[in-house]
Image (tube, rainbow, N blue to C red):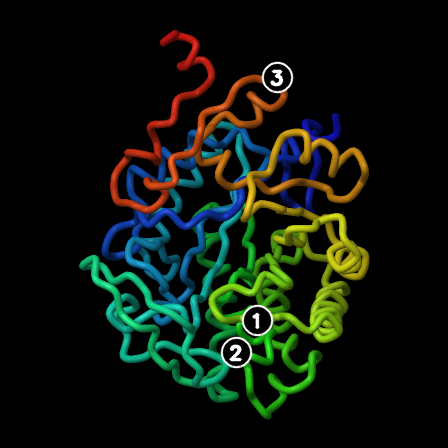
Amino acid sequence: MKLFEPTSFGALQLSNRIVMAPLTRTRAGEHGIPNDLLVEHYRQRAGLGMIITEGTWPVQEGRSYPGQPGIETDEQIAGWRRVADAVHAEGGTIVMQLMHGGRVSHPSISATPRIVGPSAIAAPGQTHLADGSKADMPVPHGLTTDEVAQAVQGFAQAARNAIAAGIDGVEVHGANGYLVHEFMSPVSNTRTDQYGGSPENRARFAIEVVTAVAEAVGADRTGIRLSPEHGIQGVIEDDAADVRATYTAIAEGIAPLGIAFVDVLHAEPTGDLVQHVRRTAGAPFIVNSGFSSLTTRDEAVALLDADQADAVAVGRLAIANPDLAHRWERDTELNEPRPELFYGTTAEGYTDYPTLAEVRAMA
């Protein structure tokens, strides 16, 4: 089966086509420094074809959640080096997702005077603060044109830091309502300069970020995650023609770079929009259908055997089964995820899921 065959995405070597999706887990402490928990969590999952880390902030202003890791300081770089070394010692490949949260944050989380977005429009709803309380999403500072350029360079420097830490590559987080995605929607982006208005202008920031990252660390170590039509955190994309035009512009803009992969989260990975993005971008293609439902082994096998993707990203089952590739290849039983423990500060629900061998030894 193609799912279990090795492949390469640019400079990235995958032992199989099962990719660990990026998953926020909030275990990196007050200062965003990867610790023993993160080292063990990622080490356990090195048997997956490629790990994409949880969203990691490139600059302090882009931190979205308490306990989220960063890749800005020397201490954070050193912490990630421990993670990379542990994954490599097990024969794995690890890519860091660079996530600037944009307006999805709060100054008490970012520890900065402001949060930022493409426009001064707050994300809907509330966010959880470190003390357990909730706060309304604040109105962000709308980035000036010069500040947009600075944000692009923040991604590029974070990519350099990730590679300096021994991480194999980086994924630009252009999905799920965070800064890069916020630029794509006319609901969250009402700018009138070159970054707003038309689909081509709203695509510009994503293209500039990917281009800068590719120039910084090599296109063959650069990917991007997209989530067209996901409609999350107030980044609404409900005009089909506008969505297609926007994502066509992004795909056309990154196609000449020859990046390592494009990673798309969408409920219909075999649909026309997703496959159009694949053809247009021309890069190795990862799909992730999960959100409302878990991605199953049969679905993953079928997607690859029908040449609908080059790899499949899996989230919750990769949380619950550190040896998921081993279990799926043998088509054997799985641990059930414990959603109530997805976010926390301890090993419970993080590094205590047993492998198949451990389950059978306990039987």
Q: Which residue is mark 1?
A: 236
The location of residue 197, given as percent across then percent down, is 64, 87
Q: Quadrant of residue 62?
A: bottom left
Marks 2 and 1, how far apart at CA: 8 Å
Instruction: Give the residue type that dot 2 points to.
Output: Ser
Kindly identify which residue carries mark 3: 330
Return the x and y of residue 13 as percentages of the image width and height: 64, 38
Q: Which is nearer the N-term, disc 2 or disc 1? A: 2
Residue 267 place in picture, x, y as percent: 64, 51
Q: How many marks?
A: 3
Q: Residue at x 67, y 47 (%)?
A: 286
Location of residue 180 by image quarter = bottom right
Q: Residue at coordinates 51% horizontally, 64% vertically from top-left?
A: 232
Cβ atoms at labels 2 and 1 below 8 Å apart:
yes
Judging depth in this view, the residue of 11 and 284 nearest the camera is: 284
Q: Nearer the viewer, mark 2 or mark 3?
A: 2
Disc 2 on helix, strand or loop? loop
Nearer the observer: mark 3 or 1; the answer is: 1
Find out whether the residues at labels 3 and 1 contact each other: C-beta distance under 8 Å.
no
- Closest to the camera, between mark 2 and mark 1, is 1
Q: Secondary structure at mark 1?
A: loop
**Mark 1, other Cα within 10 Å: few <14 / some 14–19 / many ≥20:** many
Q: Above or below — where is 157 with respect to 22? A: below
Compared to 174, does 312 lie above or below?
above
Which residue position holds label 2?
188
Q: Locate residue 9 relative to residue 158 in the image: left or right.
A: right
Q: Characterize the local packing of mark 3: few (<14), some (14-19) or many (20 or more) Cα atoms within 10 angstroms.
A: few
